[in-house]
Image (cartoon, rainbow, N blue to C red):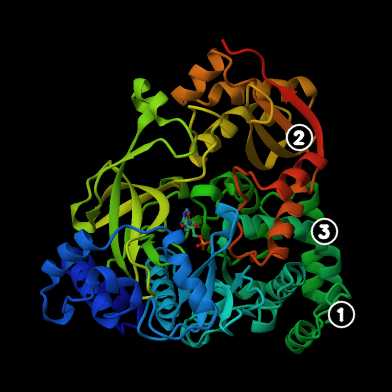
Amino acid sequence: MEASSSEDMIIWFEEVAKNAGKVQMEILKKILEINHGVEYLEKWFGDIDVHKMDAEALQSLYTSMVPLASHADLEPYIQRIADGETSPLLTKQPITTLSLSSGTTEGRQKYVPFTSHSSKTTLQMFKLAAAYRSRVYPTKEGGKILEFIYGSKQFKTKGGLSAGTATTHYFASQEFKLKQQQTKSFTCSPEQVITSGDYKQSTYCHFLLGLFYSPDVEFITSTFAYCIVQALTLFEEYWIDLCNDLSQGTLSPRITLPGIRRSVLDLIKPNTHLATWVRAKCEELEGSDWYGLIPKLWPNCKYVYSIMTGSMQPYMEKLKHYAGDHLPLVSADYGSTESWIGVNMDPSCAPQNVTFTVVPAFSYFEFIPLHRQHHKPCDAVVAGGGGDDYLEDDPVPLSKVKIGQQYEIVLTTFTGLYRYRLGDVVEVSGFYKGTPKLNFLCRRKLILTVNIDKNTEQDLQLAVQKGSQPLIKSRAELVDFTSHANIVNQPGHYVVYWEIKGVVNEDVLDQCCKEMDAAFVDHGYVVSRKTNSIGPLELCIVERGTFKKIMEYFIGNGATMSQFKTPRCTTNQVLLKILNLYTIKRFRSTAYQ
Ligand code: AMP
C-alpha cells in the first residue's frame, strides 16, 4: 500500500473496509507465507504447504490448529531472541528490535518484537487518521504541531538487540523522519528534545518552542490525554521562566542536557514582544485557574488530539478545563505496541462516544465473544478466585462479529505473534462497509476482587466518578486515583486512593466514600458487602504530587511518558508503599444497607 495523499489514503481504506473479510484472509495468508517454517508454528503447522492453500481454507486450518496464546506462551521465544538467538523462532526475518508493551497497565513490562513493518503501519495509521481529521478540521500548509511526545533511552538486551518502547523506536525510524518531511505540519521540537529521556526537560522545551512558534501551532497532541494534562500542570510552574527565555532567547538552567540545549538554542531567538504577550495572558490565566489556557496561548490551534478513551477518561474534565468551551477535543486512534487496530473516522464525535473502525490490512484479527457473568446473579459464586467474570465462546473472524456483543481481541501479526490475546475488551457498535466499529471498554485483567466480586477498570471508573460528585460543590477536583483489594485482614475490603486539588471538608469526603461504596453495582460485591464478607470501603486521600511520584517511579523503570497509564488497580508493593506513605486522611464507609 503506497497511498500518499490524504484522499488516496481514504480511498485505499474504503476499499479494504469494503472487502474486509477477504482482506483479512489474504493478510493471514501473507503472514503465514512470510513466516512459514518458524519454530513457534512448526509443531502445529510444520507439514502444511501454506503457499499452495487457498486463503479461506488456510484461515480455518490455522484457527483450528494453532492455539490461542498469551504473552506467557511467547515469552520463552522472545527471551531467546533477546539473548541473541538468530534462528527463525517467530519470524523468518531476524528481529533486531524489541518493544516494551503495557508495563504500566499490567504492572510488569513485556517485550514484543518490533520490525520495520511496525513503523510502516504507524506511519500509515498516522496518515489515515490525519486524512479524516483534515476533512473536518483543515490545517494550514506548513503549520506546526505542539506534540508532547517522549522517547526513552533505547538499551541493549543480553544478545545485543535494541530494546525500548515502540514509540521510541518509531521516533528513531526512517518512517518518522519521512513523516516529518512529507506531511504538511511539523513538530515544534527537534529530535533531541523528543528523545532526551528526561521528561521534565523535554516538556519545558516542548513549551518553549511551542510558544516561540505559537501563531503557527495548528493543533496540540500527545499519545495519551494524561500526558497533555501532566504537561499543562507543569506549565503552571514553568511559565515565568519560559517568558524570560522567550524574551531573551536563552534557555533556563533547568535544562542541563547538552544535546537538548544546543538543539533548542539553535532554533530560538529573543522575542520581547511575544514574551510580553505570553506574560500578560499567563497573568490573566492564573487568576482563572488556567481555564482556557490552550486557546489563549495558541490562538490558531484548531483542536487537541490524543487518546481520551479507556483509562484516559478520568483526565477529560481537566483537559476540557484547559481547552475552554470551544476548542474541539479529538479522540485519537486505537492501537497497541503489538499492532494498530482501529481509526477514528469521525473526529467531530465527542470523545466519550468515539468508535474505532478496524483497519483490516494491519494484522489478522479474531474476536473472542465475552459474556459478563454478574448479569446472571446465580452464577456469581461459581466465578470465585483469581480469574475474571467473563464466560467465553470460540473466537470468530472479523467478518462474523455481531453488533452489541463484547469481545476480547486476538492478534496474528507480521511481527511474529500468533493468535495472541491482547487482553482488551471492546464492544462492536456497528460496521463501516465490511469492517467493525469498536467501542473500547477496558483491559480485561484489571480487576478489583476480594472474593466473588469482580470489578473491571470501567466499573471502578464509574464508581469513582459517582463517588467524586460531592467534590464539585466544594470546587475541588479529583486529580488521579488507583485502588487495591486489601485482603490482609478479614474481611477483605477495597481501598481507593484519591489525589485531590482543592480544600475539602472531612464530612464531604466521608460522603464521597459512602457514595463510592454504593456505586459498585457488581452483584458479587453487593452480596458480599451485605453479608459483610467484604468490609466497608476505605478511601485514602494522598498528598498532592503522589501520583507524579508514581509516574516517576514507572519512568525510572523504563516506561516513557508517551506510554504511561496510571494503574487503576495495583498489588505492586512499591506503589502501595508510596501510596500509604503519602496518605494524609482515611475514611471508611459504613455497614451496607
Ligand atoms: P501499550 O502497548 O503499552 O502501548 O498500550 C496499549 C494499550 O493501551 C491497549 O492495549 C489499550 O488497552 C490501550 N489503548 C490504546 N489505544 C487506546 C484508545 N484509543 N482508547 C483506549 N485505550 C487505548
Residue that carries the numbered disc 2 in the rendered image: 541
* Number of the label disc, if any, that sits on residue 237: 3
Q: Is label 3 or label 1 in front?
A: 3
Amino acid type, mark 1:
Gln
Q: Residue at x 54, y 25 (%)?
A: 519
Q: CA distance from mark 2 to mark 1?
A: 42 Å
Q: Is label 2 or label 3 in front?
A: 2
* Few, some or many residues within 10 Å of mark 2 (<14, 14–19, 20+): many
- Say if residue 140 shows up in the picture: no
Do callouts 3 and 1 mark residues in contact (Cβ within 8 Å)?
Answer: no
User: In x, y percent, where is residue 517?
Assistant: 59, 23
**Mark 1: secondary structure:** helix
Q: Quadrant of residue 46?
A: bottom left
Establish whether ligand 1 lies closer than 8 Å to the Cβ of label 1. no
Residue that carries the numbered disc 1 in the rendered image: 248
Q: Quadrant of the N terminus?
A: bottom left
Q: CA distance from mark 3 to mark 1?
A: 19 Å
